[in-house]
Amino acid sequence: MTVGTQMQQAIAGMQSAAATMKTFALQTEDKQAKNDFQQISEQLDGSLEILKGRQKYIEAQEPQYK
């Protein structure tokens, strides 16, 4: 498995986790839980942006990983 493939899988996993947290936030009526789920989804979104930037860097440095 290439680094590019591994990075794509990591990004897909984080996107899925963020979407799940957003769904939980929408479905719960508990205010604390809603806030927690929203906070987690925001943290995942931030981490996702970092990973996407890293992916672009890898692709620029090593075109075979695209």
Image (tube, rainbow, N blue to C red):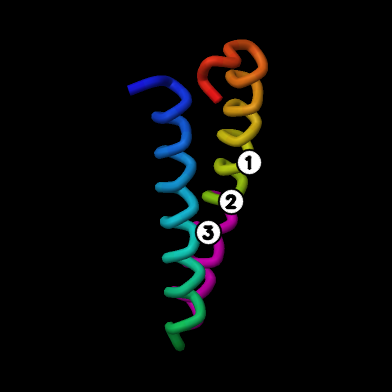
From the viewer's perspective, is residue 62 above or below residue 37? above
Q: What separation in Å lies between label 3 and label 2 (alpha carbons)?
A: 6 Å
| Amino acid at dot 1 | Glu
Q: Is residue 35 magenta?
A: yes
Residue contact between numbered discs 1 and 2, judged by CB atoms under 8 Å: yes
Helix, strand or loop status at disc 1: helix
Q: What separation in Å lies between label 1 and label 2 (alpha carbons)?
A: 6 Å
Is 61 in front, or is 13?
61
| Image: magenta residue range | 31-43
Q: Is residue 1 magenta?
A: no
Residue contact between numbered discs 3 and 2, judged by CB atoms under 8 Å: yes
- Rendered location of residue 25, percent (x, y): 49, 75
Q: What separation in Å lies between label 3 and label 1 (alpha carbons)?
A: 12 Å
Q: Which residue is mark 2?
A: 45
Q: How busy is the neighbourhood of tag 3: few (under 14 within 10 Å), some, or many (20 plus)?
A: many
| Amino acid at dot 3 | Ser
Question: Would residue 30 be found to the left or right of residue 49 on screen?
Answer: left
- Rendered location of residue 57, percent (x, y): 65, 20
Is 53 in front, or is 21?
53
Q: How busy is the neighbourhood of tag 1: few (under 14 within 10 Å), some, or many (20 plus)?
A: few
Q: Which residue is mark 1?
A: 49
- Rendered location of residue 13, percent (x, y): 40, 47
Q: Which residue is mark 3?
A: 41
